[in-house]
Amino acid sequence: MIQIYRNYAEFKQREVGEDTEAKRKAVLDIIRQVREKGDQALFAFTEAFDKVKLTQLQVPLERIEQADQNQDPLFVSSLQEAAERIRAFHQKQKKDSWFMTEEDGTILGQRLTAMDRVGIYVPGGTAAYPSSVLMNAIPAQVAGVGEIVMVSPPNQEGTIHPHVLLAAKILGIKEVYAIGGAQAVAALAYGTESIKPVDKIVGPGNIYVALAKREVFGQVGIDMIAGPSEIAIVADEAANPVYIAADLLSQAEHDPMASSILFTPSFSLAEEVQKEVERQLQTLPREKIAREAIDQYGGIIVVNHLDEAFEQVNLLAPEHLELMVEQPFDWLAKVKHAGAIFLGRYSSEPVGDYFAGPNHVLPTSGTARFSSPLNVDDFMKKSSIIFYSKQAFFSHGKKIIALAEQEGLHAHGRAIQVRLEGENNE
Amino acid sequence: MIQIYRNYAEFKQREVGEDTEAKRKAVLDIIRQVREKGDQALFAFTEAFDKVKLTQLQVPLERIEQADQNQDPLFVSSLQEAAERIRAFHQKQKKDSWFMTEEDGTILGQRLTAMDRVGIYVPGGTAAYPSSVLMNAIPAQVAGVGEIVMVSPPNQEGTIHPHVLLAAKILGIKEVYAIGGAQAVAALAYGTESIKPVDKIVGPGNIYVALAKREVFGQVGIDMIAGPSEIAIVADEAANPVYIAADLLSQAEHDPMASSILFTPSFSLAEEVQKEVERQLQTLPREKIAREAIDQYGGIIVVNHLDEAFEQVNLLAPEHLELMVEQPFDWLAKVKHAGAIFLGRYSSEPVGDYFAGPNHVLPTSGTARFSSPLNVDDFMKKSSIIFYSKQAFFSHGKKIIALAEQEGLHAHGRAIQVRLEGENNE
């Protein structure tokens, strides 16, 4: 049963730090072998870990083209509409290069360009998450990334779940490989005979995928390494306990480590939600996972007033935050850290997971203190532009030399000096 | 002597991958001890590594206040003017939150907020780099970070180089600790009795600092881990060989691993630069370092035409790129990847290192393919905003359920279903 606490400090916090040294060693070995043996290592690891003998790594284009066959039409059209909404939102994120000119003729600026080639990791297993394909690939497409390639572990037939391929088809992604795990990350980072290396790898995965991404960081860019996720709900006495319970459980069903926490000043609401969570749990298909999450990492914190709720939410820095209060916009400025903020009674978390438009790849485990939802910026890079005028150069030259000399970098000073001497300063 | 090549492929590439497993183990142990023993571990490690017995960790405020005493006035005023220019440039980077409204009443948006507390690592040793303090701290200040704290290893007097403190004074930074190495990174990430933990750690450091940052990534944010740096110069036959040689050497004097490469279609320019590098090297105070860098990782690549030069530059994705060609802006669009691009004869790299305004913390070792100069965005985070209207909810509800059900996430579907059932849909 979900427990009621009087104080967030009493609440049992997650201790996520698992000892991963042995797994890390295994991952380092996989990466080394992929770098040395290329495709051959990919075939061998796929046989060992995914228990399937592939004859080719790339998924044939006709499989992607046919992925909408035998699918529920409402599912297909909903996925298409979701893609359109996600694209519309992310287009608002796209920024332009800019320049500033100074009176003396100097031009300074920041140029934005898209990355050339990006790899998206899509987890395998029995479930398939086509929404995750949309959320990872669309920001890259909006950024203008030239090549987007997808990898996902093969199933027993040596191919990828048709829902994932359907998402690829909707987005026009044509380069898909049926490989997963640390070996897929290594192949994307370093390349093999049949897979060209990428500039960045994004997308969720198991602990081996996460460790491999951490190791190849620097060779390629990576997104945040996701930890167990959480939802915090701030509710006043007018909020609906049935909706709150349902939203807490929608997070809890993800993972036994997921955390679902309600903050409310109303003790009667707390008790109603407690009962309602129990009632709804009993008929939930993923009851076992959700119950484990609720028992271990769920909680209801009864605060003295709403201001106190926000103080505690800011300590948590939750991935998802629902404001189920009257006049939710009045409280928005109190939120310092959260991945996504859902305001009002109709903004249930699954609305954002699937359909509203903002990204569902969000900073977890308190990392909202310093990181952001996946967005178009994550697939672009900046270059500084410096065009110094002769006038600016002669006006600043001696100052630059003074700074360089004080740092003991005399060759820096000389690069200025040779120009001061070599140019006629009219 | 700097060698001339006919092709970039012949050129000896850097192999940076040093085996760091033993150092990593040492770093893991340092982090563990700082987490367990707090300040006590900091004092002990400082005595062991920096050979100085501290009585307090924090640098007294009066030391910072007095840091402009006994300094060269031109140096002080130049540092102040540089800070102003850097601030003016970075202010142009600051972005606003935004919202979009839909006809049905839905509001979606992206809120930007500054991080609460950021730590800046400043390397110690015999040299001091006040310019690095400016470049790391000013973007954080422009972002609006509430607390900026600085750490730097103590010298034999148990304090920090006065040039570094001068930079702190100019910027108004008051919280400075005389600690360095992996122990400083651990203290910033996890906190001790006297040091409050931060949300992000930025700034350059030695291999132990880099490894420690990599380990605490996730607990806090970090900037890129810098590798050896490089300059590429593209020059046509009209370019001045004296300037080119001076600029190549200004990079080479940093570090024996630094790489200085000229691309030119002119064989006669190549020969002149070769001689000029040798001539300038002979009187350089840091000749030994620069010569080692030039011999090992310097080179002149004679290409068939300028287009070919840009193809090869894009493979290198250099940290610094100078375009010493007629009409440099005509060539800008050919550059795909570079940290900072310097256009024209007066835009020598040290102009950007110290004074122009753009940041000198740049992506090294080819990481410009996927990363950016340090900038204001690095100290802010985004939160998605979702306020769904009743009309949008009823129009999309069944589609969201279809998507959730196909992913097997029934509690997600139910969070929508209970609202569709619970609300009167007028």
Image (tube, coloured by chain):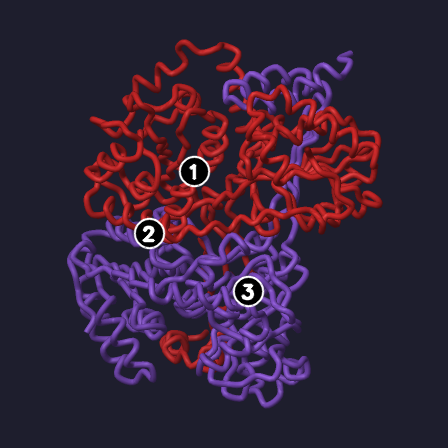
Chain colours: A red, B purple
User: Disc 1 on helix, strand or loop?
Assistant: loop
Taking B171 as reference, is B372 above or below it? above
Q: For this rendering, which residue is in front, B157 or A100?
A: B157
Q: Amino acid at mark 2?
A: Lys
User: Disc 3 on helix, strand or loop?
Assistant: helix
**Residue at point 50% right, 18% down?**
B406
Relative image position of residue B401 (x, y in whole percent): 59, 18
Which is nearer the N-term, disc 2 or disc 1?
2
Q: For this rendering, which residue is in front, A112 or B29?
A: B29
Report how far apart the C-alphas of labels 2 and 1 lie in the structure.
18 Å
Q: How crowded is the residue under tag 2: few (<14 C-alpha within 10 Å), some, or many (20+)? A: few
- Tell me: A210 left or right of B385: left
Q: Which residue is mark 3?
A: B35
Q: Which residue is mark 1?
A: A205
- Tell me: B183 left or right of A319: left
Q: For this rendering, which residue is in front, B333 or A323?
A: A323
**Residue at point 71% right, 51% down?**
A9
Q: Which mark is residue A25?
A: 2
Taking A14 as reference, is A73 above or below it? above
In the rendered image, which quarter contains the N terminus of chain B? Answer: bottom left
Is label 3 on the same chain as label 2? Answer: no
Taking A10 as reference, is A271 above or below it? above
